[in-house]
Amino acid sequence: MTISPMSMPFPVDEVRVRQSVFPTDIEDPMTFRPRACGIAVDLILQQANLTGWLTKHRPPTFSFLKNIKRRYVVLVDRLLYSFKSTQPDTYREFFELTANTNAYVTDQVTGVLFCIEIKKKGHEDSWFLQADNAEDMKMWLDRIKRTISCLRTPGLTGTITSQKLAEIMTECEEYSTIAGNHRSSSTSSISDLSVAFPMPPCSPISSIHDSINRKSSQRSYSISSNLPPQLPPPTSLPPPIPSYAYI
């Protein structure tokens, strides 16, 4: 019996099953990366380190596109995903954080407050994410910077989890710690020097003035005691003027 090619069943169900199968090893960063068949949305939302609504801005050069979009942003492992809703089918955009990524508060978008710029060194494209208030901006910036610090830490492997973010120090925190240790070391050195070479106690100002006056009086007395005694006043008239003084 010959089967016509047109009558062969198309494996639609098989394709759907294959597309819905994703790796589930949450210790493997590849689990959260986008694939040709999509992303594991449920797993990404479950393992997210931070989620929330942010306003995504495009730089002014892209004026032919809509510059402002409200997006539900998810930070998972080293990836930032933007969705149109809290129950998405797929992502709209994604940004992969790397060791050469920088994140900072920016005023490049005119008139926009609480805006974070995320940019890779040597790349032109940036993400501009605006928070609703200063506290949200600080929270997002802190989590993003901690993620970047994890990626810059030698020997740190596996998925970046909330626990790892809590244990890592950002560069700002490291600088603050180093500066604090330096100040403590300097203070300790000064204290040790004071113990080794104690300074005489300071005298009050009144005592200093009394000492100066006393020394001044002593100096005046010593000078006067070294002078010869004064001659007594004359008791007789002075001699007459010589006559030749009138010539």
Image (spheres, helix red, strand yellow):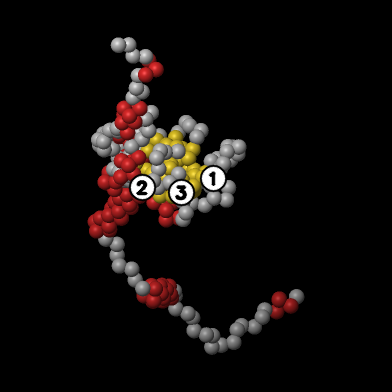
Give the residue at mark 2: 50
Checking the image for residue 68, the label placed there is 1
Q: CA distance from mark 3 to mark 2?
A: 12 Å
Checking the image for residue 137, the label placed there is none
Count neighbours of disc 2 (C-alpha within 10 A) and say few if under 14, some if 14 to 19, many if 20 or more.
Answer: some
Location of residue 54 with respect to 126 vertically, above or below: below
Is residue 182 among what the camera can see? no
Label 3 SS = strand
Would you identify the image quadrant in which residue 165 lies?
A: top left
Give the residue at mark 3: 54
Label 2 SS = strand
Q: Residue at x 42, y 38 (%)?
A: 91
Location of residue 237 with respect to 156 vertically, above or below: below
User: Residue 150's x, y, as percent?
Assistant: 32, 39
User: Residue 37's x, y, as percent?
Assistant: 37, 30
Q: CA distance from mark 1 to mark 2?
A: 21 Å
Q: Residue at x 24, y 58 (%)?
A: 195
Location of residue 185 with respect to 230 vertically, above or below: above
Identify residue type, mark 2. Leu
User: Residue 4's x, y, as percent?
Assistant: 37, 14
Location of residue 175 with respect to 123 vertically, above or below: below
Q: Earlier in the sequence, mark 1 or mark 2?
A: 2
Of residues 152 and 92, the one drawn nearer to the viewer in this rendering: 92
Q: Earlier in the sequence, mark 1 or mark 3?
A: 3
Q: Residue at x 51, y 45 (%)?
A: 69
Quadrant housing the N terminus: top left
Count neighbours of disc 3 (C-alpha within 10 A) and say few if under 14, some if 14 to 19, many if 20 or more.
Answer: many
Of residues 26 and 12, the one drawn nearer to the viewer in this rendering: 12
Identify residue type, mark 3. Leu
Quadrant housing the C terminus: bottom right
Of residues 105 and 62, the one drawn nearer to the viewer in this rendering: 62
Label 1 SS = strand
